């Protein structure tokens, strides 16, 4: 059973909670990373299947390196680093803290052994424990700016580790999929039956000057700030994600052979890489099959389509006569239509695969007067938006090396929203901006449609 | 002397003008394309220096192919195409009208000879003449939708050819720059002296709901539509372009060696391609020299910096503590601050190189009460904006094959505004959106800075 | 009509002939290079179709550069070079004489114009004329070592230019073939009819200690020296080249789909480049068509197969149960079986395409006692041998920069023998060693089979 | 301690020995492969550091696959394969037995686990045991052609596995060298002290018609056959290998910066890959350091230079005024000058690094009348020859799929002779032909010089 980190995170939380709460949250997140690696051998954890992905062992080490570099070395008196060369080996992309091992060579590191990396984690955890129990944390409420900054770094480190938890799952999925033996990561936790999916409805949101970005309640990355006004034209948004069944119709209609449906660059990609279906789909005798973390099986038409690039999402939307929502439309719709707290199919559920939409319970009669709900807004699949990833008006990066976290990737990527079945539930929120290049397919990325107020694109 | 096409273009113009006016505009534009090739030999016109660029001969043929394919074949009864294979050879990227010759192989076409391509142009021109003098044009004002569409295609063809005129210049510049003999395209038309440049001022524009896009007066590409509202926060914009002298300070401050100034992707590019200065700059004994269309000469510190990529523009802006304007900020500023008609250093001036800013004449006393002017908004250099090139709310592509004109490039490119010294004056307008990938440097692209209302980025 | 250089060349010739004879040979060769370019426009001469090939203009200039660099500058007092930068622009690969323009960028040189290159040739020719008429040449027979060396360099320059004449033809053929218009270099000089080809016979050569290499009579490149003994086992050699018809049977038998017939490296190439037939063959409605210098036409089954790589020659031979001859077997067979002087289908015949074998005339009765003749040993197609190109025992390169001529290419190439339809007749001899990498196909390269004495491979 | 397979191998041996002897040889070789992997973790055994190298796990599996595919499946009644997909996963390059897993993806196979591969080995070993104890082996001497063929296959399998033992060492060395932690494979088995090296002497061999190839005594690969005559000119050969100290003088003399010393192709490689020294050398504060299987340490000037490509060996030889021996010169010299049985520094010695030359013992007075001895002919380093790898006259490949063993690599590779410190002693012989491409450096390859009889190259 996965380790649930149900503890409240957030800048406020870390600053105000007693150290015990913070320490428990830390421990929960650390345990979850290792929990995800339990089904894996040391060999599985060492191999890198492509330059975009990293070995699980590297993720386990890098998340520890983050605390060591940004928290322990500057702030824990007497801290001794575990290994002098790990500073370089497990730096991902922080130029300000020195050299880094070349990304495509992460998979060459058969040493340190997985067991040593686990020992590294213990070493860091013990030091973090000392830090979290030290005086300054006990009196965090009275602490000055320096302590607040430290608390914020610890909190950032926990969110950082949660991001890598998602990558552990997406990267191991990619690795196993390249193995002709089609290994199973973990046997399915729950039965997947052919479900009937609620009809796709168009939910209307009128024109407005919307507020976008974090409202300051709880943790947020710098790229969610500042909260600002944006003019959003009236639009309609689909009540649920596009299903495999719907996407199959696109394929069968020649979707991958019709250039007029694609961005020029996307069409070049289709031809160069011979895309014919989402990543992990393979033609089989009885129709398409797909590789999942619980093995190879038939494509379920009721499940949301997943592992599509932005190019595919965009082409599919064009084929239907609709379009992708902008990130502001998405954020507006969630505020308006997703009146429940964040809930959905997350990594906490250990399903690790998007699930068919379930109709909103008609249970409460009073509900009928409420607006229709946005299904699958949380979890299942990250939802590609039409928005290029760029800074919000007034954006400024965090000072110091951790400022290399988000801002320097704000070119030629697209924003995704809502989290996936590989995201920890406590990690996501309405203002969360994930981002990937337009050809990336190995994340759990799916499609929600939108259209203009009048029903046009 | 260059052929000036001072004739009024625009959707309205073409529909309403007498055929004589339209025909004159057509002829003027056609003549200008050939005028630009006059200094070039057949050999110069045949060679392709990189996949992004095309031979001048190809531009001359492709612009004719456009009229032949979209205007003459469907609409001129009895039209016979000049050569059956030109349909494929000179198709650029219109998938809907059939196969196309591979772009990187345009430079292998030593045949047809330049003289044959000129004959092709004459053939198309004669047919266009017949078409423009035929009945339907004579009575264009009364014509129905079909004729309006035809008029719009002719007008589009003229704007299309003007775009290729700019490419003829940028592509031949690239070719000649690769030749160790450093050939001169044309001797300088006017003396370039070391000028004193007016100080950079910050011009303020308050927050507003702005209108962006074409106002329907005159021709516009589909990507300028529809006109729509956008929330623009208060901002400040630089009164002129960044100069070579200012950019040199960035270089000398280690701008190309400091990763913290760059987008991650831009930094990768800096290292992979060993960028150390703008394209066409070379270190010389007495300092930097640059290749221009009038030969190799010392970098003039008063001229605007040119041939920088979006990555360089963005890094430079970050180094100064400012940022690039969004395309909406640019459009707003031009409407607000550029109270004169479109004027500047255009290809009509046959200078083919950006010129130092000239202070706005303080002449008229009454003027003092007017807002300060935006210098160099038109011509000189295309100005990189912070805006990813994406569709306006409600955007729809033109029906038919010409719909492949703009929309399919709306991914991973950035918007540039304002035209350059290689742009025909009659081609540009406030709503005009040019676009190139973030690493492109061979266009005449420069930098205008912006910052937030409070002076922050 | 082509310019025939029937004049005797050779180290002896140059040294002993009157200067008039040498000068005439020089002029004949120079004229022939330009004769080959007559059907070409300046555009045709400027373009480079692949890194392996060079523009015709470059060949015209480089062959002049050779005389200028190695003959005129060191030996003609007062010689002024035509253009200071040509030293770099037209250096092919001689590191010892300074920098060179990058090979893949030869096609970017739209300047100097073809007309300037012709002027360069005239400049060099005039200087060569002065040199050849000067005193030292008049008295060449008495000249000392220095003059002998100069004579040898002049002679080398002439053979060098003849090599480039062949490349002018092979490179322009490649360029024109890449043009969808399939331009014709020159209309066929003679009718190509379906001929009946004499049956392939196996001609036996008994085991011996053979002498290989130049016998010192006439000019030879350094790679033909020293003449030396080699043990040659008894073998049989095919009386003529493999025909298109025979090669077609290989294709139809799945030759390009059966890995067991290929070198591993060749098989990788077949798949990577999707080889399905010789270069310049294309499937047509009525069977295979091929591009030739006189246009696109049906493959003639009687002609020798041409434009095959060593990998294809080797695979074809394996398929027949035979093999390629070693270069020593070839040289032995020619000495033994080719009792006539060098005659065949050469560039002098302006056919520029291999011709079907013609049976040896049975005319002279006395002939019946002679050994059977090797047909097509000279001209038509270069014949791939099984011999890797390596130095003869005791080989040493010529002193000085011209020593970079042959020796530095003695790795990973294979020897070809006998000349082709693009070779000048006076350029070839029994000891001549041509060499190309095993995947090269754009030369006029064909196949002659051999087998062991007992008929086995 | 390494497992020594001192048992006599050879076609004769397998056929004539009692099954017990054959089985013992088999078991010894199998044990040695696993012995070599003992210092390695499962992670070390899974990773592939470049396309040329394979994971150790793959070698362990592939050598078992060989017996399974070529011996057990066709010849052991009732044999059941261990896993149906291993047929594809562990096929190296045998097209005739079906598909194969792409070579560059061998490192993606985190499954099967190392433990499963060991189980696979046990499965094959048990079956081989049954086969070797069955009736047909007991009566091998009387067996007909089929049994002889089976015996030959078993013997081939053992030699095949010995080849992969060498690759296990070279491939793991490459992997560990890419790890910044510079892991040690195994602590040094014996002390390496600075030795004084005997002076290089030139040993003369007069001209002769030599016999080359296997004499039929003992096992030989097909590429060593048939034994045949070859004319060998008189030559001189160096008494020992080139040392690091000697090679350092080449480096310090600008060897890697002087194009005139290199094959053209080699020079391109030097520049493209920035070669400045042999593979595994790194500049350090106190001079060059080198990575070895017992760790990073200073370059020992007395040891033979190792991990050089053919290009480097050839350039070094040219720099000294000498050349590389041909493979026939090497074979002749060994027959003539190496009058002792095969002895040297082999993998049996578990040193895994070439050792300085030791002067031949002057001990026995009678010896003085003997010819001087060739030192280091066996073991230490494979010796590059000047001979391109090509078939011997009359060569024919073994029938069936194992015929893909050697013949299909006979293009663009060079022959190496004499074995290395990573070669099992029982694997090598005078006629043994190893082969690698001219740029390969990760094998234990070194340099022995030769020159012509008269002392010239």
Image: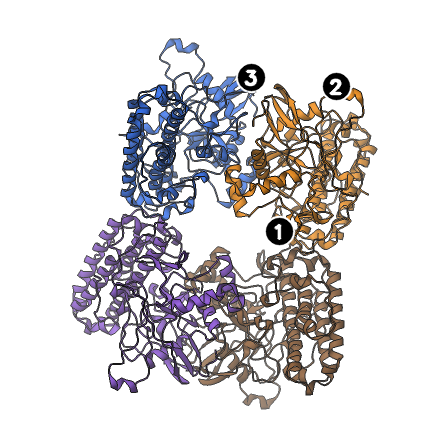
Chain colours: A blue, B orange, C brown, D purple
Position in image of residue B51 (x %, y %): 61, 48
Dot 1: element: helix
Q: Is residue A363 above or below residue B305?
A: above
Q: Chain of mark 1?
A: B
The answer to whether marks 1 and 3 mark residues whose Cβ atoms lie closer than 8 Å is no
The residue indicated by pointer 1 is B105
- Quadrant, the N terminus of chain B: top right
Q: Is residue A158 left or right of residue C26?
A: left
Q: Is residue A234 left or right of residue A77?
A: right
The front one of C437 and A180 is C437
Q: Residues within 10 Å of mark 3 (few under 14, many from 20)?
A: few
The residue indicated by pointer 2 is B369
Q: Residues within 10 Å of mark 1 (few under 14, many from 20)?
A: some
**Which mark is in front, 2 or 1?**
2
Are discs 3 and 2 both within one chain?
Answer: no
The front one of D105 and B156 is D105
Distance in Å between CA atoms under marks 2 and 1:
57 Å
Mark found first going from the N terminus, 2 or 1: 1
Position in image of residue B21 (x %, y %): 82, 33
Q: Residue furthest top?
A: A366
Q: Is residue C285 above or below residue C383?
A: above
Residue C418 in view here: yes
**Which mark is in front, 1 or 3?**
3
Q: Chain of mark 2?
A: B
**Which mark is in front, 3 or 2?**
2
The residue indicated by pointer 3 is A207
- Quadrant, the C terminus of chain B: top right
Distance in Å between CA atoms under marks 1 and 3:
49 Å
Q: What residue lies at 74% left-to-right and 35% top-to-bottom?
A: B154
């Amino acid at each position: 059973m996965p380790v649930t980190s149900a503890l409240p995170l957030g800048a406020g939380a870390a600053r105000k909670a007693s150290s015990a709460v913070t320490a428990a949250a830390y421990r929960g997140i650390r345990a979850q990373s290792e929990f995800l690696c339990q089904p894996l051998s040391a060999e599985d954890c060492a191999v890198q299947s492509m330059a975009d992905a990293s070995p699980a062992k590297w993720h386990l080490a890098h998340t520890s390196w983050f605390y060591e570099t940004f928290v322990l070395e500057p702030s824990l008196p007497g801290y001794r680093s575990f290994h002098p060369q790990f500073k370089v080996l497990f730096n991902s992309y922080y130029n300000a803290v020195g050299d880094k091992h070349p990304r495509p060579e992460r998979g060459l590191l058969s040493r340190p052994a997985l067991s040593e990396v686990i020992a590294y984690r213990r070493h860091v955890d013990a030091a973090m424990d000392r830090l979290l129990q030290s005086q300054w944390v006990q009196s965090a409420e009275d602490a000055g700016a320096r302590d607040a900054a430290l608390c914020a770094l610890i909190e950032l480190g926990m969110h950082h580790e949660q991001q890598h938890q998602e990558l552990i799952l997406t990267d191991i999925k990619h690795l196993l999929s390249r193995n002709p033996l089609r290994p199973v990561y973990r046997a399915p936790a729950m039965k997947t039956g052919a479900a009937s999916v609620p009809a796709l409805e168009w939910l209307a949101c009128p024109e407005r000057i919307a507020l976008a970005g974090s409202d300051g309640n709880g943790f947020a990355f710098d790229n969610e700030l500042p909260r600002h006004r944006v003019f959003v034209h009236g639009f309609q948004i689909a009540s649920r994600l596009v299903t495999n069944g719907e996407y199959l119709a696109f394929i069968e209609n020649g979707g991958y052979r019709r250039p007029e449906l694609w961005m020029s660059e996307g069409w070049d990609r289709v031809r160069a890489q011979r895309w014919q279906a989402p990543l992990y789909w393979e033609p089989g005798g009885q129709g398409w099959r797909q590789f999942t973390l619980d093995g190879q099986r038939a494509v379920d038409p009721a499940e949301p389509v997943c592992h599509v690039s932005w190019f595919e999402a965009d082409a599919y939307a064009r084929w239907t006569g609709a379009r992708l929502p902008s990130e502001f439309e998405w954020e507006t719709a969630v505020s308006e239509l997703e009146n429940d707290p964040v809930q959905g199919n997350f990594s906490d559920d250990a399903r690790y695969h998007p699930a068919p939409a379930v109709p909103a319970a008609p249970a409460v009669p009073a509900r009928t007067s409420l607006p229709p709900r946005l299904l699958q807004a949380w979890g299942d699949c990250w939802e590609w938006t039409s928005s290029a990833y760029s800074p919000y008006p007034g954006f400024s990066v965090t000072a110091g090396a951790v400022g290399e976290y988000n801002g320097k990737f704000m070119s030629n990527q697209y924003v995704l929203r809502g989290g996936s079945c590989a995201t920890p539930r406590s990690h996501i929120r309405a203002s969360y901006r994930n981002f990937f290049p337009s050809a990336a397919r190995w994340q759990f990325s799916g499609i929600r449609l939108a259209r203009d107020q009048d029903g046009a694109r």
